[in-house]
Amino acid sequence: MNNTKTLNDLPLNTIGYIESLNCKGNIRRRLLDLGLVKGSSITPILISPSKDPRAFDIRGTLIAIRKEDAKYINVSF
């Protein structure tokens, strides 16, 4: 774990670890409810044909996250 960037920067099929969420309010609650908590592993698995959203493996579940929401998620990889 040597780079800390946003989730948008995480390359396909590379495991990253959530460092922090840089948002407040409903979006923060939504991301936390999806299991995006500090230390959780996250891996981009699929990219839609339009490049947005991307699908991520989080705790064994495939979840689609839009780029506009992924920019709030800091990861290390």
Image (cartoon, helix red, strand yellow):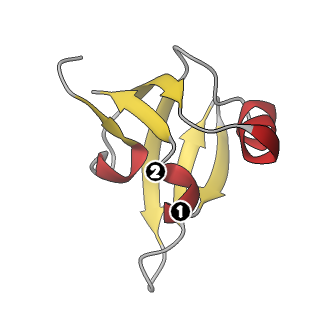
| Above or below, 52 relative to 39 | below
Residue type pointed to by label 1: Glu
Q: Position of residue 55 (x, y in %)?
A: 55, 58
3 up-or-down from 30: above or below? above
In the displayed structure, 64 sits above or below 58; it is below
Mark 1 lies on residue? 68
Q: Which image quarter: residue 26?
A: top right
Q: How far apart in space, not on screen, are marks 1 and 2 (Cα)? A: 6 Å
Residue 45 is marked as none
Element under disc 1: helix
- The percent position of residue 64, horizontal first and vertical second, equals 63, 59
User: Which residue is painted at 64% across and 30% down in the image?
Assistant: 36
Q: Secondary structure at mark 2?
A: loop
For mark 2, what is the residue? Answer: 71
Residue 45 at x, y percent in the picture? 45, 53
Q: Nearer the viewer, residue 23 or 45?
A: 23
